[in-house]
Image (cartoon, helix red, strand yellow):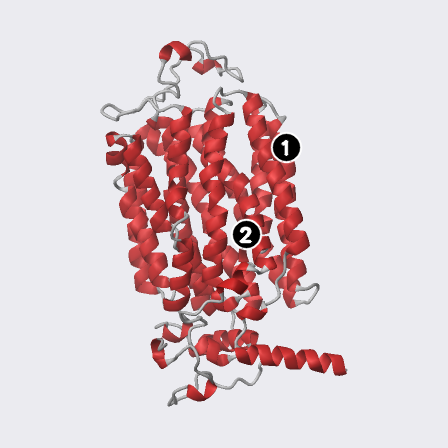
Amino acid sequence: MPLRNGYSINSGPLDEPEVSEPLIEPLNEPDSAHPQCCSARLNLAILMFFGFSVVYGLRVNLSVAMVAMVNGTDPDPTENTSVVHACPLPPAAQNASEAFQQPDGIPQYHWDSEIQGWLLGAFFFGYLCTQIPGGYLADHYGGSVFLGLGVLGTAVLTLLTPLAASLGPYWLFGLRALEGFGEGVTFPAMMAMWARWAPPLERSRLMTLSGSGASFGAFAALPLTGLICGTLGWPAVFYLCGGGGCLWAVVWFLCVADDPRTHRRISREERDYIIRSIGAQVNSLQTFTQGAGHGWSVPLLSIMMCVPLWAIIVTQMCSNWSYYTLLTSLPTYMNDILHFDLQSNGLLSSLPYLGCLPVSLLSGVAADHLIKRKVCSVTAVRKVFTFSGLMLPAAFLVAVSYAGCDHLLTVTFLTLSTSLGGTSAPGVYINQIDIAPRYAGFLLGITNTFGTIPGVVAPIVTGYFTEDRTLAGWRKVFWVAAGINIAGAVVYTIFGSAKVQPWAMTEEEAAEEEKDGSRSIVE
């Protein structure tokens, strides 16, 4: 089958077209590294950082806005009068209405906790659908277009949120599902781009920098949403977030390229360094010349039988359960149990993600340092950071469940739980590019599809447990999340691996691997 650039799936090194100049100029020091400061790859990571900040702002804005959109959580006022609050109301709220007052002309809706749970989970129904096809196409064509269009489409749909809400919860559910459908391609597209851009010894820091934009986006969006809801009204949240996403998309399309060979402003030295370092890792310059892609051929059976891949899938599902539980339901907990006002609710709900940002960035630097210094293997590095990033948050989630009505302890434990979860960023969350660089985007699509299932189920389960808004119900929520985290840590410690899988190698790479193995036996 013919592919782009004149290649076919069965073409070998002898089929390559002649080029007028060498792809890489010879370097005097083969191990020399081009500095990251002001480099094209660092600029790409920073732009991705802000892109995923927008992505998560678009994703979580409804979590806080829901508190302002809903006129009480129970549409029957006769039942509302018999509710016993789990924690005492603050003095200023003793005689206040449960509904947050909005500027004149801003509508509010009577949606019970079950409807709210479905609306908060609606995004992930669409998000599930485009992960795998997005990763597959991004691997083949390059990720820049898919990442840009994913953010742009979600931003445009976000502008329609107030209209959909006015038409009813079914319309809002459908719109949020469409937003998830558009945003589902973003993370697989990121992985596909880093397969072309990230030198192996810089992967952890570059990918954690770009991915940590999600934590920054959650940190910024949650308090800003509360502030905007209290001053301009909740519809302004969606207009401003949608406009910000459209603006970022314009900058993205003007500044990025799928790989270093086609970037207009990259230096020759950096281009050669990236291509040489990635080419050395896959032991085949031809693979990178074809964009590090896989054509249209994918070894599906081998992928389905890959134990390290299933370890990633299970672990991400377990980790995401607690993450999505807090991401979608923490503002509700702050409102229903701790009775924070809307502005304080948004600010305090964002603190865990502020802590996660530096922890994930420092973890990425530490992971690269350990790998570069050969302190331990890549597999050991991934396991250590993943284990700590799941077990420590689980311990603090259990502590939250027994903090009761103590505001300081609750906020502290929640912040520590999510912050320490950032240590898993250079662990399981970038493991796909270790085991199969050529299929990195496709594999991330698979793992993210499974990893999104908790985003669908967790808000619904939380709504079921907390229907009566008691501490006992929320204790179940935190215990379930902690137990699932522990299970994920155990699974990855036993079955995880960072070794390139045989089915992910080209014929030349497999032959070289076999040759190295034979040499080791002889020696």
Pointer 1 residue: 398
Given residues 99 and 121, the one toward you in this image is 121
Q: Is residue 182 left or right of residue 425?
A: left
Query: Which-is-in-front pick, marks 2 and 1?
Result: 2
Dot 1 falls on a residue whose secondary structure is helix
Q: Is residue 4 left or right of residue 403?
A: left
Question: What quarter of the picture does the N terminus occupy?
Answer: bottom left
Pointer 2 residue: 313
Look at the image and tell me whether residue 494 can be seen: yes
The residue type indicated by label 1 comes to Val
Relative height, residue 171 to residue 259 (above, below): above
Look at the image and tell me whether residue 215 can be seen: no
State the residue at coordinates (58%, 77%): 510
Residue 168, image x, y percentages = 27, 30
Relative height, residue 259 to residue 65 (above, below): below
Given residues 195 and 36, the one toward you in this image is 195
Residue 235, image x, y percentages = 28, 34
Dot 2 falls on a residue whose secondary structure is helix
Q: Earlier in the sequence, mark 2 or mark 1?
A: 2
Residue 263, image x, y percentages = 37, 72
Seen from this angle, which residue lies furthest front? 301
Residue 74, image x, y percentages = 39, 18
Are the residues tagged 2 and 1 within 8 Å (C-beta)? Answer: no
Q: Is residue 247 left or right of residue 313?
A: left
Q: Which mark is residue 223?
A: none
